[in-house]
Image: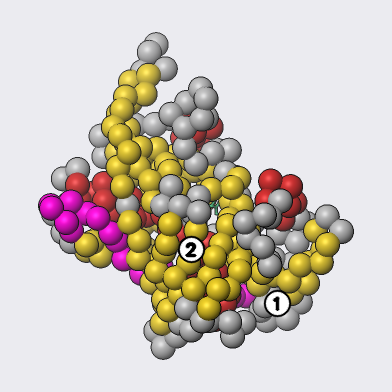
Amino acid sequence: MEKKMKFTKMQGLGNDYVYVNCFKEKIEDPSALAVRISDRHFGVGSDGLILINPSKVADCEMEMYNADGSRGEMCGNGIRCVGKYMYDYGLTDKEAISVETLAGIKYLQFFIENGKVAKVKVDMGSPILTPAEIPVVAEGERAVDEPIVVDGTEYRMTCISMGNPHAIVYVDDVKNLPIEKIGPLFEKHERFPNRVNTEFVKVLDRNTVEMRVWERGSGETLACGTGACATAVACILNGLTEEKVTVKLLGGDLEIEWDREKNKVFMTGPAKVVFDGVWEE
Ligand SMILES: N[C@@H](CCC[C@H](N)C(=O)O)C(=O)O
């Protein structure tokens, strides 16, 4: 039987997902749908699928799937787009909302322009630094500036969870990095039991860094919100930047602040609609 489902493709700094309003739609197998709909030749084309669900504890729930169908606990660029969808498509008239995720409840504040959400500031909560909770195989209380050997080369990494796992690796040349080769080797390295998102980072000055990301389950993307937050925390822990950091990604800039007193990370960035459509199969 042919089925039709309304969707909206949205992007945050080019990190694009297909969003489905599950206040109205019902999806039987979201993991399998994520694989089909994300395909850039035979599907809509995206880095994954995000369902916007009703929640008993927040204004809505974000259920996030990578392009390979695996579940992500959190998605920084995705949650800003969820906020924009909630406001622009009339599911809320509040300018600050809460969103339930597998990494806890996150709090969003909207910046409205011409009646629509242009930018969103997200309270991303506290970074997780304990190796077993990230998870990464490492001795000691934190995995900061740890050696790791990948493809015969020794890199230094700092590991942080923003609800999902990240390894931040410092490199001299972000632009010419063989990310298609080393990204998957980091992702599936035996030290990361749940696989990992890897951020390749160059510090430009005390408030600015450049970053490319290889995402768990989706490959190289143009931006990663949780990755930018983890990168800022890693740079601060390594004494490389101040507490406010502009993270320059392939798709644009994110403003990140780690408030050490509150131990909270704040991310501010844009959210955009690409188009609305109907998926038939
Ligand atoms: N692009 C996202 C992160 C998406 C999930 C990630 N690939 C994972 O599996 O943890 C972001 O903007 O944070």
Label 1 sits on a secondary structure element that is loop
Residue 146 percent coordinates (x, y): 74, 74
Per the image, the residue denoted by label 2 is: 248
The answer to whether 226 is drawn above or below residue 3 in the figure is below
* Residue 260 seen by the camera: yes
Per the image, the residue denoted by label 1 is: 145
Q: Which residue type does callout 2 highlight?
A: Lys
Q: Nearer the viewer, residue 219 or 108?
A: 219
Q: Residues within 10 Å of mark 1 (few under 14, many from 20)?
A: some
Q: Which residue type does callout 1 highlight?
A: Asp
Q: What range is drawn magenta here?
A: 112-130
Instruction: Decide if residue 267 is on the left or right side of residue 110.
Output: right
Q: Let me know if residue 260 is in the magenta part.
A: no
Q: Can you name the residue that lies furthest to the right here?
A: 152
Q: Nearer the viewer, residue 14 or 189?
A: 14
Marks 2/1: CA–CA distance: 22 Å
